[in-house]
Amino acid sequence: MIQVTNLRKRFGDNEVLKGINFEVAPQTILGIIGASGSGKTTLLRCLNGLETISDGSVKCSDVQLESGLSTAEYKRRVRALRLKVGTVFQHFYLFPHLSVVGNIIEAPVHVLKTAKKSAETEAFELLESVGMKHAARRYPESLSGGEQQRVAIARALAMHPALLLLDEPTSALDPRRIASLRGLLRGFAEKGHTMIIISHSIGFLGGVSDSLLYMEGGLVVEHGPTDQVLNSPKDPRVKEFIAQAE
Amino acid sequence: MHKSTRAFSALCCLLALLTFPTFYASAQQTLRWGADPSGGAPYVYTDPSNPDQYIGYEKEMVEALAAAMGRQAEFVPSDWETLVSALQRKSFDVIVNGLEPTGDRAQQIAFSNPYYVFQLQLTVRRDDDRIHSIDDCKKRVVGTLGNTAASRLLQQQNIPFRSYQDPVGAYRDLELKRIDAVVMDVPAEAFYARDNQKLKQAGPPFSRGTYVIGLRKGDDAMKVEVDKAIERIIVDGTLEKILRKWKLWNDAQVEFQTSVKTKTPPAVAFEMTNSSFNWGGAFWRLTQAALVTVLIALGSMIIAVVLGLPLAVGQWNGPRWLRILCTIYVEFFRGTPVLVQLLFLYFGLPVIGIAMPGWLTALVGLGLNYAAYESQVYRAALDAIPKGQWEASYSLGMSPLLAFRRIILPQAFRIALPPMTNDFVSLFKDTSVAFAISVWELATAYRELANASGQFLLLGLTVSLFYLAMSLPMAQVARLLEQRLSSRGIERSDEAEVAA
């Protein structure tokens, strides 16, 4: 579904990503863990085109983004990539001037040119699936953090992305809500969605992701099935990280 | 030694000569006379070859009068529109400024006997073949001096007119085709227009009236003195000499002075222009002025709101050259007074062939000026939108333009609305600077109507009410809009909860 090859990202002299390689199989969830400053968030921003990649390539379905393209071509492909990749930001960034339904239908109506009526019908279905149908006509500022997150997930899914990125989805949630988010995301994976979840909560990722990727210093240190990475990590740094988390 | 003594005694003589009249003057009484010297030729005006001195036939006449009265003339430069109230405030003793005795003035001040018979002259552009007399002007705009016999005549005949503060402005606008004709007293016309190759006289002089000296009511001793002096300079030929010198001697003067000399009533009755103040009419004129004010305010608001946005975006996120251009624009319009900008647009642009009518100049000028202010309000508002809003929009596949239009701008608008409202209330009041370019808006209307009637207090209150009646609802609408926008989420969510 997504293939990242030798991805590098430099900010001036500071190389944040030093050659990342991984792949995510369709209908699976990849969890990315790592300490702050390991490059997780930069990686995510490269995957949805918010950062320009310095080297290597990102391929999602039939869109391949790579370094060395002309500016115009790069921009064109970023636009194409963003239609394939949906993002749920850590702080959600709902549009405060639009109602919940307005937030969800905004991009389908104005980017995909879906008819407003059918976009709304679908928005209600999505809201139902995230348990937020009752709040359809409310405005973001009147929602709790967990509710806003669900709306943000529905907003991203309304664009039918091939891949959904979630940045630190548990940071704003209490334990009870974390459990219900896990159930929700698992349900979406079973319905066929592919996801990458960035988190430093190993407990959360353990219960939700199919595979885990541990990053440190801008490199992939370990990548494998979740059980294997959690229970018998090969690299001592991963072992230490897991031990500290517990 | 001998030489220097002679020089010294010459100096003493000179000093004595110089100081003597002053001494004498303070011993004798002065005759302080008020007139408007700006654009005041040939009555009284600044001597172009000697700018710290005033010249003019009325100045010479007042000096002759003062001499006849045994007084010393002292000129008090003043403003035409406020002469009457300045006289009442005792800023000077008499008005000598080609003043016509009108009914409304008679209620406020007293008049001397006449000293000059004036006629009116219609002037048009040289290539004009439509206008031959004042009757051809029913559907044209005629320029004249505000608050004069000519303006009253036009008003009585329902001819649309524009008031000017000096003849220069009126004739220049005639040249620029901003108006179709100018009616002016013959002396002013002779001085300012007769030699202008681009203009011509339309028909012969018409409508006789007299100039008198304005006096404070109750100052009867002064009236007796002034009347006696006028008679004396007419009888002894001094006035004739002055008028001949200024080329103002004509048949009308011959008739008039003969009647004075022979103490027979004039063979020709001199029309006395009269317009008593009528509140209904004033109210109607104020309403018209209010409409012009609204037109200018709304028009310039639209320009400011629309033009402010590209300026803001250019300055905020444009390429370097555009940022510099936008900054220059903003700093230029914020850093210079709006009055100067208007005067530049009105008087300066015609030099390069762009002559807009006054109301349009005011509308465009205020619009350009306020666009600079609005751009800064927008820029601050745009800066206040979190970067995450852009990123969320991009990650949903929106183009920068779509994100700006659908996501950023509506949020920025909410932030910008309160300062914008503020600016618009003040723009509304700033329309009053348009009076500097003779636009008939509320401030001009107040000045002219109040000067014509002396009703400064009542008219002032009325005009203030007009301004309030317009600005209060505007502020209210803005407040409602703000409330609607800022509390929409909360209100709606309450409804939703009640519904659920």
Image (tube, grey):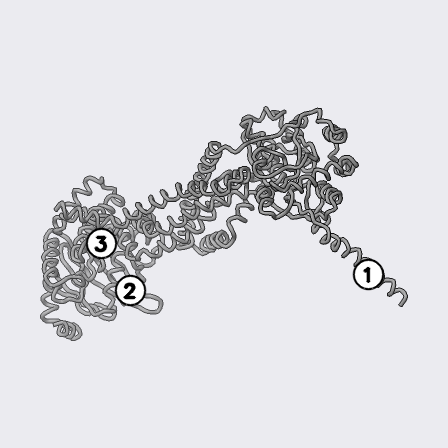
Residue lying farthest to the right in this orientation: B2
| Identity, as a three-letter code, of the amino acid under mark 2 | Arg
In which quadrant of the rendered image does the N terminus of chain B lie?
A: bottom right
Residue placed most toward the observer, A25 or A52:
A52
- Residue that label 2 marks: A8
Q: Is residue B41 visible?
A: yes
- Residue that label 3 marks: A141
| Identity, as a three-letter code, of the amino acid under mark 1 | Cys
Q: Position of residue A231 (x, y in %)?
A: 9, 70
User: Residue B12 has which mark?
Assistant: 1
CA–CA distance in space, label 2 to label 1:
99 Å
| Mark closer to the observer (2, 1) | 1
Q: Residue at x 30, y 60 (%)?
A: A53
Secondary structure found at label 2: strand
Residue placed most toward the observer, A12 or B293:
B293
| Identity, as a three-letter code, of the amino acid under mark 3 | Glu
Tell me the chain of label 2. Answer: A
